[in-house]
Structure formats: structure tokens, C-alpha cells
Image (cartoon, rainbow, N blue to C red):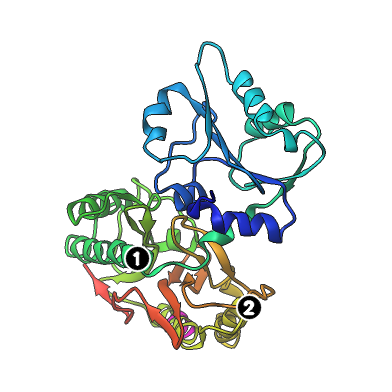
Amino acid sequence: MSEPRLEPLKRVLKNDGLEAVALVPGPNFRRLFGRDFHLMERPLIVIVPASGDPVAIVPHLELASFSELGFPGKVFSWQDETGYANAFAAAAEALPNLKSSNRFGLEAQRMRVFEQMALATAFPDARFVDAHAGISSIRLRKTPDEIELLKEAIRISEAALEATLKTVRTGQSETEINGQLIRQLFDHGADGLAFDPIVAAGRNAAEPHAVSRDDYRIKSGDALLIDFGGSWRGFSADITRTFFVSQVLDDHRALYETVLAANQRGRETARAGITASDVDDAVQTVLEDSNFAKYAVHKTGHGLGLDIHEAPQIMRGNQQILEAGMVFTIEPGLYKTNECGVRIEDNVAVTDSGIECLTSFPRDLRIIG
């Protein structure tokens, strides 16, 4: 009897010519089984063959939690004191058709080396291949329920940002503002953080992935870039807004207005039936035609869902066709080294008639503090 939860993955196996795939805890695992486990020193792996039932290798201390999944195959557990080698060997014996040379797909961007080595010992004739893109494709198109979870994560995040901005004053450090933002996220209902927030002021805002400083006090005229997101039931927001403290210089205003125009062009361009490359090209053209072209350093965006960065990648050269249900970011930025950086990031969902912008936080230039 087939397991409905595994049907999307079984189609990937067939389409990609794979005899099996191995999953470790993470977004793909959660998408299939409804919950996740921590990646740690104890390997937990599910092997799904193209035909037949899956098997799982599970640390003994996780057995009670794993039993709640209603897993439709055999489970081989192991204890810390005896190690996991025998559990891997037993799993291989339960899958005799995989003992010969077969294409075995791995989540190459997720699985650790020691986990692959354990599989290689248990399946010495397997040909391991990178199947990350194919496996992750099961998450490309979000269901209506998943989009509602994303909307709630975004609603929480936007409310937390507004509450945080009301407390910002000159003389605060980036880490103080960061701490306030995190408190507000949980106070407004987040059940986790999408990632460590980026709160960057002045010259630090010109670093796309800046680290908040505790030894810099924000001052009048600084740009204040905040990139953050709260999580709700596994789904996360990813929002960036850039503000100015007390005043804004004319050159920085022009920088901001250019990024805003690029963001708007991306939201106007995105729709089902065009490619991810088409969206990025539209956005990058706005930046390239401006006086600030040399300050553009990254693509337009990335997919968003159970993972913060997933397919589709919104970049030139990616000919993936956008389809209804896909969710991604539109986040153009300009970064004037050692002076100022601006990024404006929205989360959008592709619909049959265009896009729905899931973020609603105002984009117009805002002076705070």
C-alpha cells in the first residue's frame, strides 16, 4: 500500500532515475513527515527506495518522538554505547535491491560527511549523487495552508518591527536594538527566529551580511538596515527595511529611491509563466541604469518557506519558470562601502493572475529616532 506523504518524493525518484534517496532532519524531512529533529552528532536518516517501504535509522533517545510520525516502514535504532554501524547495516539488509550499484540520491547541501560515510559503508556499491534540487522540489509550490502560515509569520514580524522602531534613539548600539527586536518578536507571538537578525547602522549597513556591533552608537544621519524574520510553525518571514536616523543626506535619499524603484519593478514584473531570470533582469536593469550601478552586488532574491533560502533562486541565468504557489523574496540592495547601504525586501507568492505581496510594511523612506 502506497504512503500518500511519500508520493511527491517517489515522483522525484522516477523522474531523476534514482533507486533511493536518503533524508536527514531538515525542511524536506519536515515537509514529508510534519515535524523535524535536530541535526546533531547522532545520525538520524530515512532511506526511501523507488519501490517498497522506507526504512529509518534512529537514535534510541529519539524513538518515542519518532514513533509519533506514523512512519510507514521499518525502524532500526541504536544506542550511544554501541554506535550506529549495526543499525546502518541492518537497514541495508532490509533493502536488498540497493546492495548493487544503484543511483542513490543525497541532500548534498544538508547531509554531513560522516553521514554519507556511514551510508557508503552500508551500501558499498551505491553511486551517490547530488539530488538536493530534485528532493527540495517537493517544496517548490506552497499549499494554501502553508501560505497562511507564512502570512502569520510575516504579520508577527511586521508588528514586532513597528514596536521596535518606536524605541530607537540616537546613542543606542546595534546590539541593543537587535535585542529589543528579538524580544518584540517573541512578545508578538513568534515561536522562533528565522535567523539571527541583522541590525546594521552607518558604514555597517554597507555590509550585506553585517554583524551587529555593541561598540558603535547610532547617530544622526545613519542608515539603519534591519533584516530579520520570526517563525511560525516552521515557516519564516524574511524582511528587510532600511531607515534613517533623525535626517537623511541627499545622496543617501537618492540611493534609497533607486532601490525602492528596483523593488517596485520586481513586484510589478513577477508572475506565473516567466522565468526567475526575467524578474532579476528587470530589477537589475533599474540598478544598472542608475548612478549607483557599481554598488549592486547580489541577485534579486530566493525562495522562502520551511527554509530561509530555497528554490527558486531569483537570478539571471535561472530559466526556471515561475508557477502559482511559489514564494520568494524581492530584495534589491545598493551598498556604498564604508558609508551607507540600503536594502528593501518583500516576500511574494505567485498566483494564477500575478503575485500576492505577503509583506505590507511601508516602503517609503522613513526617518526614525
Tag 1: residue type?
Asp
Q: Mark 1 = which residue?
A: 145
Q: Which residues are magenta?
A: 258-262
For residue 354, above or below residue 348: below
Name the residue nearer the viewer: 206 or 112: 112
Horizontal and vertical percent position of residue 21: 65, 45
Disc 2, SS: helix
Q: Mark 2 = which residue?
A: 277
Does residue 207 belong to the magenta stretch? no
Tag 2: residue type?
Ser
- Seen at 49% across and 41% down, the residue is 72
Residue 172 visible somewhere in the drawing = no
Disc 1, SS: helix
Name the residue nearer the viewer: 282 or 124: 124
- Seen at 58% across and 80% down, the residue is 284
Residue 17 quadrant: bottom right
Residue 144 quadrant: bottom left
Residue 155 quadrant: bottom left
Q: Which mark is residue 219?
A: none
- Seen at 21% across and 60% down, the residue is 164
For residue 194, above or below residue 259: above
Residue 137 visible somewhere in the drawing = yes
In what quadrant of the picture does the C terminus appear? bottom left
Q: Is residue 362 left or right of residue 90?
A: left
Kindly give the residue lying farthest to the front in the view shown.
Answer: 1
